[in-house]
Amino acid sequence: MQSYPTFPLNDLPAELQREIFSMATSNQLSCALRLSLVARRVHEWVQPLVYEIVTLGADDTALFLRTMDSKPSEFFATHVKQLCLAVSVNPEDAARILAVCTGVIGLAFWVDYLAAASDVPLSALITSLSLRRLSIEFTHYLDLCEISKPSSVNWRVKLTHLHVIFWADEEPAFIPHLECLSCLTHFSLRLRYRQLTEGSISAILASCKSLRILAILLDELDLMQDLAKFEDKRVVFMPYPDAVQDWEASLRGLPDIWSRAEEMVRGHEGSSQRGPAAHMM
């Protein structure tokens, strides 16, 4: 059996050791818990990385709440940056989690919070967050926008990526409040059973001055239908992905709907530029 030379890890500077363990955790998060058992200092390096991206459903919310009770709230406020709360999360649990994870900059909020008639309004949970990305259901988006007072709204000041989901069979003739999202560059809609009209899409594009991508996400069968053609190359039609996997993809350095949509837009723009030249040849 071939043997390989070994190098004492402890001989390396502490900063380099930390970088090695951080990279190992980022590349394979499943080994993070084992790495945290190597030594106390490694535990202190690795554990914050474990909680940087938190995705919760019915099976793991209770464990996360117990972990919240065992650590200072400042730990979660500092280290939880990307939070996904699936539809199976209880609204009361969602309120507890958001009350502690106040440093979140990316939020997928798929909880049916309004149906619970909670004493804590949705705006009280989200408006203070300095969000860059938000994925939310349409009626919850409306509630968040209409109840929020402009003077206390942080969530929309730096928001660049917005994904709105339609749970009900309703026609989104108009998506209000988009003009308040001055930094919005990427906007996607998850539709059910209906398509946006040309007028609706034009209104969205007119409201979002900085918009670079408008992605319409449809089921595979809907994509097989004759879809309307739009001259604006920023408009793309795409299949709806696995929601949780796609939410985590870009955070793990993997392709997601946004990177795929950007590639499609570049393809559209390239075709437009080649068209006249090809015609002249």
Image (spheres, helix red, strand yellow):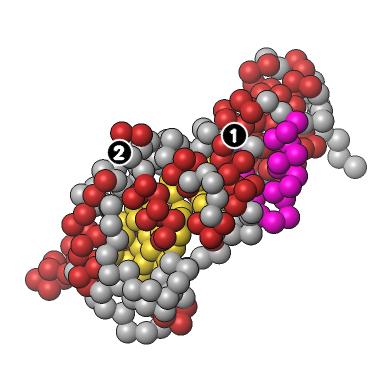
**Pointer 1: what residue?**
100
Per the image, label 2 sits on a secondary structure element best described as helix
**Looking at the picture, does residue 129 appear above or below residue 209?**
above
Foreground residue among 51 and 229: 51
* Quarter of image, res 182: top left
Look at the image and say whether residue 109 sits in the magenta stretch: no
Comes first in the chain, label 2 or label 1: 1
Q: CA distance from mark 2 to mark 1?
A: 23 Å
- In the visual, does 203 lie left or right of 139? left
Q: In percent of the image, x 68 and y 25: which residue is there? A: 72
Q: In percent of the image, x 73 and y 36: which residue is there? A: 67
Amino acid marked by disc 1: Val
Label 2 crowd bin: few (<14), some (14–19), many (20+), radius 10 Å: few
* Quarter of image, res 244: bottom right
**Pointer 2: what residue?**
150
Look at the image and say whether residue 53 sits in the magenta stretch: yes
Identify the image quadrant of the N terminus: top right
Per the image, label 1 sits on a secondary structure element best described as helix
Q: Are marks 2 and 1 in contact (CB under 8 Å)?
A: no
* Stretch in magenta: 52-70
Q: In percent of the image, x 35 and y 63: which residue is there? A: 215
Foreground residue among 4 and 20: 20
Q: Is residue 232 visible?
A: no
Q: Is residue 152 visible?
A: yes
- In the visual, does 19 lie left or right of 200? right
**Looking at the picture, does residue 110 appear above or below residue 150?**
below
